[in-house]
Amino acid sequence: MHNAREVAIDIAMTLRAQGHEALLAGGCVRDEAIGREPEDWDVATSAPPEIVAQVFRGAMSVGASFGVMLVRRWGFTIEVATFRTDGRYRDHRRPESVTFTDAKTDANRRDFTINGLFRDPQSGEIIDYVGGLSDLNARCVRAIGIPVDRFDEDHLRMLRAVRFAAMLEFDIHPDTASAIRTHAQAIDGVSRERVGQELQRMVCGTNAIRAMELLCDLGLEFAVLGTRAGQTRFSHLHAAVESNLTWPSRIAALAIDRCVDAQGIRTSWTPTWMLSNASRDNACLILDTLETLGHWDSLTVAQSRRCAGRESFASALCLFGVDQPVAAKAIGAMTDLWANESQGILPRRLLDGHALLKAGIPAGATLGTLLEALYDGQLDGRVQSHEDAMNLLETLRDSVD
Ligand code: ATP
Ligand code: MG
């Protein structure tokens, strides 16, 4: 078995050999039909979970009440879910109960027609109970059944509609879009983790701009991001995507576009986007460096070099270039020259803490101040040798004493 597809087909065929119905289901069928590489492979079956567990020893139950099992074979993990229909929904998030059922009913409990397709593992034939194939052809995201009811059941589906439309470059069907607008103000009951995950996937994808435009257009922005910037330009996020910047840089970019400052990222966006501490700090550092770039001309050479040596510098310069392209180019040219020097932007210190202790400076705050003042001299070019450094140390020492 070389790949997840073959493993999923093998699992489905094994269930069939035992007399159960088993089909490839959901996103993998959709993606294969339009020539995309599926992210994961799911099998749907008539076999109840306890039978799946018997057939595949070691299968792990993830939410047994929903009939979902994880089967690990040849290094791949495939989700095997029993055909089900969902009972009444609690909190717009989870059904109160599920009933095991047949393939057609299972297709109808899924969110969008393009996600409701099955594929026969043996013949390869696509089985379409919900009109998903014609919507795939029409490049359309359409809720299965009555859109308002489906969004009322599970509010997260509103974000999934946005993500699929952006990711696949599909339109959202007008009735589905209008149902989202109706429900947009009420994304509640959905766990932060699920919302954060959807948002992360939107903004890290190649069509991040379209996803954000859809959020605004469908009236979801305030409910989800807590912003109401009133303008839908995403020029900084655009630059971040074009330059393939990392996830924290994209958060910083979007923060600029939506007028959110570092404090806003810390207090409001950290839970919204489920930012890790490292991502949160990186995004804030980028905003901080961007602010420094705004008064670059008033910096000393040492301050400029310190700024250019920060890890956040490249991302900040890219975002700075959106509003100040000429200045950004000049800064880039200057810092490139420094980077090409033999020791780079931040050369090794001629005198370090040990050297100062050896020279008789007691450990403490003064030592730190002297250390940085000496390094400033080095970065400014006033100190070029060990001797220069010792001379400057003597002068500084006198002024500190
Ligand atoms: P991708 O994995 O590429 O994001 P996917 O369609 O496979 O897309 P998953 O979240 O992996 O999405 O879910 C697998 C399938 O389960 C979906 O295709 C859909 O049929 C169904 N599904 C997932 N989440 C929901 C939901 N909130 N409501 C209804 N059906 C859902
Ligand atoms: Mg999937």
Image (cartoon, rainbow, N blue to C red):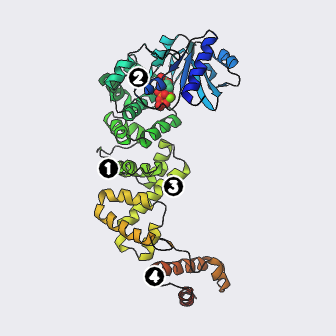
Residue at disc 4, secondary structure: loop
Image check: 356 left or right of 192?
Answer: right
Foreground disc of the pair 1, 3: 1
Q: Amino acid at mark 2?
A: Ile
Q: Amino acid at mark 1?
A: Ser
Q: Which residue is mark 1?
A: 235
Q: Which residue is mark 3?
A: 281
Residue at disc 3, secondary structure: helix
Q: Spatial distance from mark 3 to mark 4, Cα to Cα? A: 32 Å
Q: Which mark is residue 114?
A: 2
**Quarter of the rendering occupied by the N terminus:** top right
- Local crowd size for mark 3, using a 10 Å CA cut-off: few (<14), some (14–19), many (≥20): some
Residue at disc 2, secondary structure: helix
Front residue of 382 and 293: 382
Q: Are marks 3 and 2 in contact (CB under 8 Å)?
A: no
- The mark nearer the N terminus, 4 or 1, is 1
Q: Which mark is residue 381?
A: 4
Residue at disc 1, secondary structure: helix
- The mark nearer the N terminus, 2 or 1, is 2
Q: Quadrant of residue 202?
A: top left
Q: Amino acid at mark 3?
A: Asp
Foreground disc of the pair 2, 1: 2
